[in-house]
Amino acid sequence: MAESSCVHGLRHQARCLTSVKASTEESQFLVGTVGTKDNGVCLLKYDDEQAEVKSIMYAHADEVWDIASCPADENLFFTVHSRVSENPRQKKVTLWRKPVWSQENDTSLVKVTRLEQEGIKRVLWDPVKENQRVVSFDPTHIRLHDLDPVSTTVSLDVSQTFASDPNSPSLREIQNAVWSPHEAAVVAVGDQCLAGWDLRSGESQFVRQKAHKSTIRTVDYNANKPHHVATGGDDAEVRIWDIRHLGEPIMTVSGHTHWVWSVAFNTFHDQLLLTSSSDTLVNLHNVVSVSSASYLRNEQVSDSTDADADAYWNSYTPTDGLICTYDQHEDSVYSAVWSPADTWTFASLSYAGRIVISQVPPDERFKIMGV
Amino acid sequence: MKEKTLNGLMEEDNVLTGEIREIDGDMKTLVYENYSKFISATDTIRKMKSNVENMESEMDRLNESMNSLTHQTTTINQALGPNRDKIQQLSRAHNQLKRLQFIFNLPSRLSRCLSTDQLAKAVKYYARAAQLLDHYKHMPAFKGIERDCQTIITKVKSQIESKMRKEDSVEKIAENIRLLILLKEDVPELRQKYLKLGKVLIREFGQEKKQAGPVTSAEELVDVYIVPLDTVVQYYNTLFVENSEDFPPKTKQEIKDANQDLSEAIQTCINSFFESVTKIIALPVRIPNELDNVIEEKRPLKQTRDLQILNEALAEKGTNLSMAVALDKQMSQVIEVWENELVNRFLCTVVSGMRDRMSELIEPPFTEDTPYDALSETLAQFIDISETWCREHVYNNCLIPLRECLQEDIEQSSFTERISNGLNSMWHSLAEHLGTFPNGGEVSQLNRHIVCLVSSRLCFDFADHIIARIYSEFSSKSANPLSRHESIDTIFLSDCQELTELFSQTGQTLLNNQIMEDGYALSAKVQTHYLSLQSKPPTKPSAVWREVFTRLQSVEQLVNITFPQPSSPEGRDVSDSEHDYRFGSLASTLEAPPIQATHSSQSLATMSSGTGEPLGNVSKFGNDVTLNMMHTINKLFEDRVDVYRPIEPSAEGACGALVRVLLKTLQEVVREMWVDCNIYQQLQVDVEYLGIALRSYAGDEKTSSALRDIVSGAYMRCSDPVSINADDLERMLAH
């Protein structure tokens, strides 16, 4: 809902936004800026009582292309960065420690360590073994790194998978990846391809070519339902797949009118799917029919013999479809993420440096909670 | 009277006098007539007077005689009184004895009947005595008789049964069964026996017929199934369902059971009847396959006639069947199924016809060398002929023959309903067919494009006028042949609207998919190019755009062929396209430099003379910071533009869509790519080039705004942006 959204301007162009996963009491987000000068990493704290945003900017000389906040320590994060006016294809990766919030005046970051490889697009923390290892990927390789001490333990050359057809109407390299929350595996997208690898053996688990009509830019894994992933691409579509049966997507969600840059399942209520696009919109969809809520509900319905209870459930049943479109952005929205502290809160970032923190409409919340 | 003139009074007087005279005459005549009657009456009265006097004495005598008679009778009656009672008693005893004798004789009588094969008589006698025997069976004498009778009757029964088995007519069987019912046999069992025998009879009869040859005509079906079955049912009803004097009244439960037994028993017969019906009304296979024969098929079809015969026979000879098992309803269901199939058979020729046409279109396949004119002509002709064919085929080869086939034996409303359903499902399958490109076979990209665009055009045309026209032609001629009014029957209205929607959606999807296929491919090319760009001073516009415009041009041509615009609103466009298309073929335009090919030389001239465009002054899409700021402010008030949206079915629409996609791509890629001073200048060159090249495709405010956006985006990313020298820029663009 527009009235419950909180808008914050950075006065600086930015394209990466992440939630601070270790902060489960208070919604915190990190934003990295791009531009020729005064780049930085901005920490935002959202107070949902007051609907207020407090922010602090940490200086960061290079353009920031991606941030990965450590799930175990809210002060640790990686940035993927490149020097101004240098080729961003030679991005570097550094692990930083930021000062604790209370020391208001201290806005300098302390470099902890860095990865030796160049050209890395993103770094992903292991969601299970928290601060010990990360996955990184560049256009052609997926690598697994130990952090203490820093070493590369697995390196997979996946260029063949993402460049199978030299005439494909898409960018033939890895665009994005996500850890499986259920096992030591990673799902990557790029080209028109969706593929998964087991990180212990380094073996390919599945490959689905031509999963979208053009480049696939984003992927997310449903934390509550193993084997379910969502992808978004340049065909403006979002597709949800069961990676065991990749023949057809189990659901296709349309509604955007340009490239889809991010998709995110809600961690608790995975029927809520957040998507953002360079058409400047953030869409919140209900995908209850393919979510873990669908079998929860089925059990309840089959248990109840009472007709009244059935009617009750039916009248309050959330159904698939667009819940809400958030149109407070005026430029491409490259990222939209859920808050780890509050299930109903999420943030989105557009290129102009505008951050919008919004909430799931109350009606929908009540429906989901069944009250 | 008071007001009458003297003459008037005189006249009145004359009239009155005349009337009086007339009445007087009449009165006299009456008097004369009655006078004679009066005379004769007087005579008669006189005669009567004299006779009455004698009569009185005779009456006295008669009275005396009567009295003595009465007396004597009483005496006799008293004398005979006691005897009469005796006689009466005797006579009663005699009757009883006679009855007893009948009963005592019953065994012998029955056995005589049995030996002389008069079974019916035997049953009649027994039935008469049965109650008595039953009543007095406690008396030993009767018991013996009853036992004897029973033995004989058992024999009788078995004889009846064995006889019944040999009977060859339902009537005789029914008679035997009736006897058995009278003999108090178990009714449900008898029902089964009767039905079994009846079925055997029918089967034998049917086999006899079949030996003469397979059942092929409706008349034979009537003989083999309807008539015998109906007879069986008829006797069954008299025996087991209806109440009659012969039998004790039946309870509701009994009647219900009887009906159920019947329907269970004859179900197999009915099934095989319908099997045969289905066989004889089966449509010849060739209807859907050979279009020409559809028209030549004799009408009314043999099948229609057969169905009619069967229907009439059911109404006349199958009343019992219809009542008992609703055979008429079952029959009308069969007919409905058949009619629907007929409708579908006819109409599916439309879909298969269109399919054949579409596959003929690219046989032999077009190549990149096919001259533009030839391609244009072939496609235009194809579209025209196909649409005409489709319209005429639906009307002349489907709807008219169907009407001839069907209208005779069904009502107008149900005919219309069948046709409406048939048409609806035909359109749906046609839309589905046109909407999916047939897989299989290697088809080149060009041919796939052609097929999809042509399909899209056909869909749009169907939505636009063809569907409505077919419906209106059909409804105007079917509802009221005299009406010249072209309007659509209300029954078809909602269908027509729904289908129009469906086809325009299908057409739009086809067009969008087709154009976006190019959009994705070109967008990926542009991204790949810029993301891997190396830093070096610009010398000419990026080569990737040349490739893009070549493609754009051939898309424009193809769409222009498939969706020709009747007249262009701007004269410039016409001259442009004429200019373009004079190059003749796709192949030759490939060789032509894109700028010249896309534009009349006018734009280049304008550019060099510098009259219209402020190009000499650094650039149109310059990097001036204040200009950028103004631009950003303007942007705040712009409406958001959907990059992907339904594409208008025209060359302009298609190219506009592609340009929109490409500009947005460039804007996005600039934000991600490496931008140093060299690359910034390269982008300036490219944007200028695009500004010129795109003028004919999307030369509006939105395009220039997007181009300005791109340059300002690049400017923001570059730490040391130096704008390109205007002379260099001009030189590079002229290159």
Image: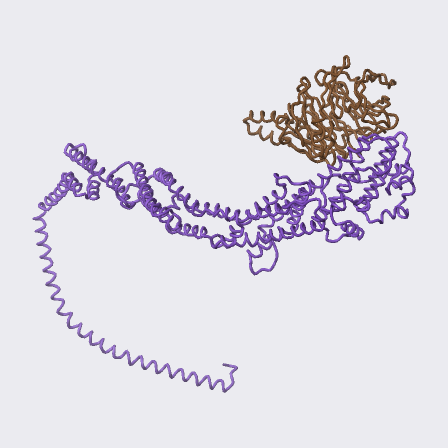
Spot occupied by residue A310 in the image (x, y as percentages of width and height): 57, 29
Q: Compared with residue B175, is residue A253 higher up or lower down, i.e. above or below? A: above
Q: Is residue B44 visible?
A: yes
Quadrant for residue A31, please give it: top right
Rendered-image quadrant of the N terminus of chain A: top right
* Viewer-proximal residue among A161 and B221: A161
The chain displayed purple equals: B
Q: Nearer the viewer, residue A137 or A286?
A: A137
Which chain does the brown colour mark?
A
| B67 with respect to A225 (left or right) | left
Of residues B149 and B347, the one nearer the viewer is B347
Instruction: In the rendered view, tell whether residue B628 sits above or below residue B4.
Output: above
| Residue B349 position in % (x across, y down) | 55, 48
Residue nearest the observer in this picture, B24 or A255: A255
- In this rendering, position of residue B144 left or right of residue A331: left
Q: Quadrant of residue B151?
A: top left
User: Tell me, what colour scheme is on the image?
Assistant: by chain
Percent of width and height locating residue B225 = 36, 46
Identify which residue is drawn at 83% across, 24% down.
A82
Q: Quadrant of the C terminus of chain A?
A: top right
The answer to whether residue B402 is seen in the rendering is no
- In the picture provided, is B163 more to the left or to the right than B303? left
Residue A104, x across and y down, in percent: 86, 18
Q: How many marks?
A: 0
Farthest residue to the top: give it. A149
